[in-house]
Structures are given as structure tokens and as C-alpha cells.
Image (tube, grey):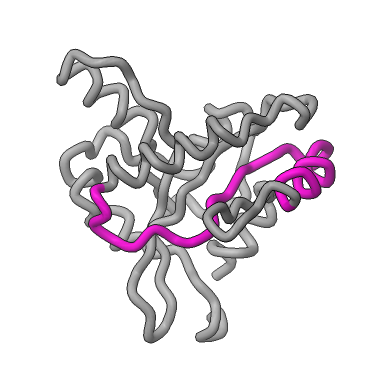
Amino acid sequence: MAPLSEWNYCKNTTLNHNLAKENRDCIVRINVIVEEEGGGKCSLFKDEFEVLNLDKIENKLAQREKRNKRKTVDFIFGIEKAREPKNIVLTECKFNYKNVKNLDMTELDEKRKHSSSLLNYELQIFSTFYLLFQDKIYPEAYRKIRRFNTDKRNYEAVTIKKLKDKFFNF
């Protein structure tokens, strides 16, 4: 069991969000979405760890509302911590990046803004926005993203393993 001071994945928070209830077909195992987003075959996470594919939900809403698709993060999941309100974590996959010079922080800000809006602020959005990178590009991505963080922007580059260790290690 993880110490009480750590945030942990919460399946109930993930699956009980209104967007999850209304879009059951957009709930996917984290191993599957990592692979679909270019992270390669992934078996790090238990099959019970499910996330909400926010891009897929946005696609459905844009079609239904006959509007252009807005930029959103790839997936979200709920987390919990003892004596704290539950939170939603925004996660973007950047597995296909070969060079972080192409990383557009304005685009990431838009994704964060539109994702938060789509989530309707039903739950608190976790303060850190996670960007998943392949192991080989991670060190460079980590350095670049740290330089761009401000009081209003808190992004963190992580690898698949680091995300697992941070929230799914139980």
C-alpha cells in the first residue's frame, strides 16, 4: 500500500465522471491508449487501470454539434489522496517526438484549457499536466519543459514508467 502522502489512481473517480458515464466507449485500458498513441507495446499497467480517452470524446462532441474539433489532451484519469479532494490528471502523449524543439507550448496551453472546459470543472484538475515521452527523448524534454513552467503553467515531462511509479504503483 502506498503511503498516505501520495496520490494514487482512482478507478471510481475516473469511471464516475459524467463524461465517462456518457461515453462508455471512450474508456480504455491505459496500456491500450499508450500503444495507440505511439508508445509501443505496453504491459506496465494492470488491466484494471482504465482511463478516459478525451480526444475521442471531443471528436464525438464536435461531430454531434457540427463544429470543428478543439485541441484536447489524449487521456485523463482520477486520483485520490487521504484527506484531499479527488482530482483529475490531464495527460498528453508525445511518443512520436524526435526533437523537442518542435514542442509548441501554446498548443499545450490550448489543450489544457479546452480539456478543462470539456471536463466542466466537475472535479479539481490536478495542478501538474503530464507529457509522456519515449525514454530516449525524455531528458531533453524534461529540461525544455522545466524552462517553460511559470506560476500559471505547471507541466512535467515523464516516461511511461515514471507515470506508473507516480500514480499506479500499488
Q: Position of residue 169 (x, y in %)?
A: 59, 66
Q: Position of residue 41 (x, y in %)?
A: 64, 33
Seen in the picture, residue 134 relative to 102 is either above or below; the reply is below
Q: What segment is highlighted magenta in the picture?
A: 120-146
Residue 102 among those drawn in magenta: no
Frontmost residue, 13 versus 149: 149
Q: Residue at x 54, y 77 (%)?
A: 6
Which image quadrant is residue 52 in? top left
Residue 71 visible (yes or no)? yes
Q: Residue at x 22, y 37 (%)?
A: 23
Q: How many marks?
A: 0
Residue 40 visible (yes or no)? no
Q: Please state if 48 lies on the left or on the right of 169 as rendered.
A: left
What is the residue that sits farthest to the front in this orientation?
151
Q: Residue at x 63, y 30 (%)?
A: 104
Q: Please state if 20 lies on the left or on the right of 116 as rendered.
A: left
Seen in the picture, residue 118 relative to 12 is either above or below; the reply is above
Q: Residue at x 51, y 54 (%)?
A: 46
Q: Quadrant of the C terminus?
A: bottom right
Residue 127 among those drawn in magenta: yes
Q: Position of residue 77 (x, y in %)?
A: 41, 53
Q: Position of residue 28 (x, y in %)?
A: 39, 39
